Amino acid sequence: MSDQVDAVVELEGVGFAWPGQAPVLDIDSLIVPPGGRLFISGPSGCGKSTLLGLIGGVLTADRGRVSVLGTDLGTLGVWRRDAFRADHIGFIFQMFNLLPYLSVVENAVLPCRFSGRRRSRAEAASGTVRGEAVRLLERLGLGADGLLERPVTELSIGQQQRVAAARALIGSPDLVIADEPTSALDSDSRNDFLALLTSECAAAGSTIIFVSHDRSLAAQFDQSIALETLNRAGRKAA
């Protein structure tokens, strides 16, 4: 679907504030092209996660237009936004949000339980959904010592982060959103993870929006934006 639109993500005149608080975001325009790799930097509290919530349809803008793959998310009801997100967007959350009572591979296949589109893509890639999950997990270094069947609670933070990445990538979503996913990794692990993430997204034709406070990562992306230069609400607060 991403190859049928001029922009995977397009924001126009977007504003957002939490109830009873000053505006968090005031963004005139943001466009992310198909297949692009966008890095968004900024200090804690500047609205990075809020922006990702708007793009992912978890939050809705107070004003303006948030369009993903040509669909104005503001025109969709809650259940339609949830279905759209399940079909088209893979999330890597800062805290990973893995289900502790499921195994590594069971966590990785979860998106395909909620999206027939991603299930079909996973099956086309590796024959079965489980087969594609195993391929991704092994590619991310989690194929040894029976790790796939272990509860995720038995894994290190770095290993859990890679499970979260496999879950986001399975079924070749059009857009992968990553919220500070490397904050708990050392520099070598961080660079290896980024190389694998960008390689898998390139192979699937997925667009990446990657958010971090670590500006040293910007060189590994096609486009880099400091949120404080894009967000007029942040400049007003400063």
Image (spheres, helix red, strand yellow):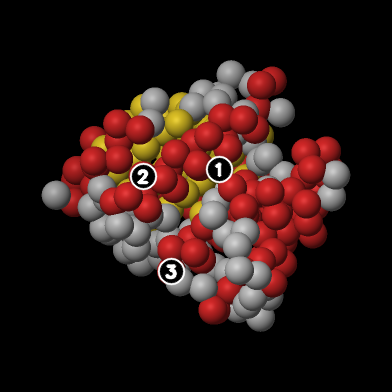
According to the picture, the residue beneath numbered tag 1 turns out to be: 176
Is residue 99 visible from the viewing direction of this image? no
Q: Nearer the viewer, residue 95 or 201?
A: 201
According to the picture, the residue beneath numbered tag 3 turns out to be: 157
Mark 3 or 1, closer to the camera: 3
Q: Residue at x 26, y 58 (%)?
A: 44
| Residue 12 placement (x, y as % from top left) | 46, 31
Label 3 is placed on what type of residue? Ile
Q: Residues at badges 3 and 1 in contact (C-beta under 8 Å)?
A: no
Q: Nearer the viewer, residue 178 or 45?
A: 178
Q: Residues within 10 Å of mark 1 (few under 14, many from 20)?
A: many
Q: Residue furthest left?
A: 238
Q: Residue furthest front?
A: 145
**236 left or right, relative to 164:** left
Residue 225: which numbered mark, if any?
A: none
Give the image quarter of residue 194.
top left
Mark 3 or 1 closer to N-term? 3
Label 1 is placed on what type of residue? Val
Q: Residues within 10 Å of mark 3 (few under 14, many from 20)?
A: some
| Residue 45 placement (x, y as % from top left) | 27, 58
Is residue 97 visible from the viewing direction of this image? yes
**84 left or right, relative to 72:** right
Q: Residue at x 24, y 42 (%)?
A: 215
| Residue 124 placement (x, y as % from top left) | 83, 38
Q: How many numbered badges does the structure rendering display?
A: 3
According to the picture, the residue beneath numbered tag 2 turns out to be: 191
Inter-mark Cα distance, 2 to 3: 16 Å
Inter-mark Cα distance, 1 to 2: 18 Å
Mark 1 or 2, closer to the camera: 2
Label 2 is placed on what type of residue? Asn
